[in-house]
Image: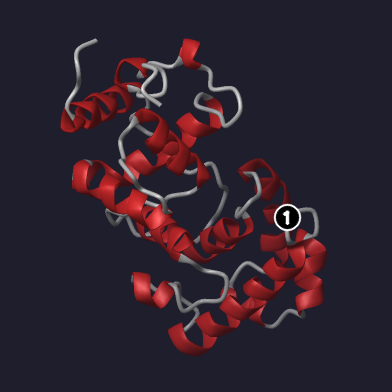
Amino acid sequence: MSKTSLQQKYDGVVAYFAEHNPDADTELHFGSEFQLLVAVVLSAQCTDKRVNMVTPALFAQYPTAEAMAAAPVEAIYEKIKSVSYPNSKASHLSGLSKMLVSDFEGKVPQTMEELQRLPGVGRKTANVMLSVAFEQPAMAVDTHVFRVAHRLGLVKNAETPLETEKQLVKHIPQDQLRRAHHWLILHGRYVCTARNPQCAKCGITAFCDYFQGKL
């Protein structure tokens, strides 16, 4: 294959996913913006599958910020103890629920700055909320997005998630950003896996530095 310009690479990757996975979305189950926030906090270093096993009982007991804010941390822990880092996550969920009630009338805020005030909410979680809950053009960079973006060669010399995010946002069309976040996550989860990437069933090897032997 002849050398592909960076923008041609982006165009090819976006075109492929737009055709083959036009409705890509989060795999987390939720019934409200608050419940999505809880699920995303729980999903840190944990699979969505495990989170989806835990949240039905959690949301049945504590469906709103008000309900969770009134719950003892120990009670929240009991509902989520099978996820990774349950102690810290129970503390985060209690703290963010209380702040939502005290500072935001029980509603999830819609800005990066306000979201990151909440306990347990970093930039990645805030970006997920902006893109999934509020349909804003935002790019959350988790381990899957970071890995896929680097293997493909979509980013250059991006050593942190923030640097990766900035380069992706610069080249992906604004109206595709929300979907692109899920494209890269799902591709990393099911095809471009960490240990044994399944290049034989990948449809974008023509645009991939890893496959082309450039990495």
Residue at the image point whose x is 70% and y is 69% from the top:
88
Depth order, front residue of 126/62: 126
**Can residue 183 be spotted in the picture?**
no
Whether 14 is drawn above or below 130: the answer is above
Depth order, front residue of 121/195: 195
Occupied quadrant, residue 131: bottom left
Q: Residues within 10 Å of mark 1 (few under 14, many from 20)?
A: some
The total of numbered circles placed on residues is: 1
Q: Name the quarter where the N terminus is drawn.
A: top left
Residue 17 is left or right of residue 120, and the answer is: left
Horizontal and vertical percent position of residue 146: 44, 43
Whether 110 is drawn above or below 135: the answer is below
Residue 19 is left or right of residue 197, and the answer is: left
Amino acid under label 1? Ser
- Helix, strand or loop under label 1: loop
Depth order, front residue of 58/125: 125
Occupied quadrant, residue 179: top left
Horizontal and vertical percent position of residue 62: 68, 69
Which residue in the structure is indicated by mark 1? 84
Horizontal and vertical percent position of residue 191: 51, 24
**Can residue 150 be spotted in the picture?**
yes
Residue at the image point whose x is 71% and y is 61% from the top:
58
Q: Which residue is outermost to the bottom? A: 102
Residue at the image point whose x is 58% and y is 75% from the top:
65
Residue at the image point whose x is 32% and y is 46% from the top:
178
Whether 128 is drawn above or below 11: the answer is below
Q: Name the quarter where the C terminus is drawn.
A: top left
Horizontal and vertical percent position of residue 93: 64, 71
